[in-house]
Image (cartoon, rainbow, N blue to C red):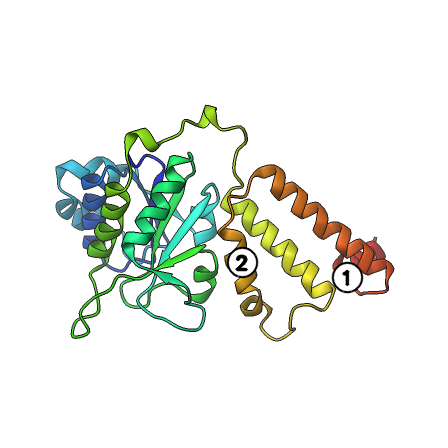
Amino acid sequence: MLDNLRVVLVRTKFPENIGMAARACANMGCSDLVLVDPLNLDMDKALPLATAHAKHILESVRVTHGLAEALADVHVVFGTTARTGGWRKSLVPPVEAGKMAAAELAKGKRVALVFGSEDKGLENEEIQMCGQLVTIPTAREMSSLNLAQAVLVLLYECFRQSRPADHTAHDQLAERHATHAEQEALMANIQETLSAIDFLKPQNPDYWLLPVRRFFTKLDLRRSEFDMLMGICRQVRWIAGKAGKNTPDKNRQGES
């Protein structure tokens, strides 16, 4: 049921949590588990916690260097956080996240649920890669959840709100959606363009671009729309260059 759903664990410290997360994946029908720079990948410790039912998930687990590699072919990314404020705004609860994820899965999109390390969570740079942030409400007296528990809660909501009839076959889609890698390329292009026309503040431009990033990740962006926006950015920089702005494109032409 959750064939297009991926669970991504970032810098996991304890192999036992990897095993329990794999078991949670098996419980909810998700077989795509990716580990980003795990700090201790000891399968001898992970396998007993996964049990025989999730052994196949651990055997096919993929390890990547950096979160961008793990998300390159994904269309929609949900990140998890226990902290609020700063980079962590517009948080949604698991019920809403499950509803949103199920809707995207029904369109044939690949969706990723991203979980940070047990002690520090996701870094700000990784938070930027997530189109939507999810937080799990808990009792104030005990606010921290075990990593595998958090994985199970999010997977359950995705499982509960997904129905076989909701899934649309890829061959029925008129056009494919922009991948996460393409969305990241677009955001880099937009940032370069907005900087060229002095729209972005030079101090911490990534932070000031965050509302723009959030806006675009909420869109159902198609590949043709991606191409159009990339072209618009190039045209804006070209016009800015003619007006005497010191654009990256103009600099590259001067160097050639």
Q: Residue at x 61, y 56 (%)?
A: 188
Image position of 254 (left or right of 113): right
Quarter where residue 158 is shown: top left
Q: Residue at x 68, y 62 (%)?
A: 194
Image position of 232 (left or right of 148): right
Image position of 125 (left or right of 93): right
Q: Which mark is residue 65?
A: none
Q: Residue at x 38, y 41 (%)?
A: 103
First reached walking from the N terminus: tag 1 or tag 2: 2
Q: Residues within 10 Å of mark 2 (few under 14, many from 20)?
A: many
Q: Confirm whether residue 104 shows in the render.
A: yes
Q: Quadrant of the N terminus?
A: top left
Quarter where residue 203 is shown: bottom right
Q: Helix, strand, or loop for circle 1?
A: loop
Image position of 75 (left or right of 145): right
- Single out the residue that lies furthest toward the top: 171
Q: Is residue 86 above or below residue 93?
A: below
Disc 1 + disc 2, Cβ < 8 Å: no
Residue 231 coordinates in the image, percent (x, y): 71, 46
Q: Amino acid at mark 2?
A: Arg
Q: Nearer the viewer, residue 245 or 20?
A: 245
Q: Residues within 10 Å of mark 1 (few under 14, many from 20)?
A: many
Q: Which mark is residue 213?
A: 2
Quarter where residue 93 is shown: bottom left
Q: Residue at x 27, y 39 (%)?
A: 30
Q: Helix, strand, or loop for circle 2?
A: helix
Residue 151 coordinates in the image, percent (x, y): 25, 52
Q: Is residue 243 above or below residue 151?
A: below
Q: Nearer the viewer, residue 205 or 250?
A: 205
Q: Which residue is mark 1?
A: 247
Q: Amino acid at mark 1?
A: Thr
Residue 150 coordinates in the image, percent (x, y): 24, 56
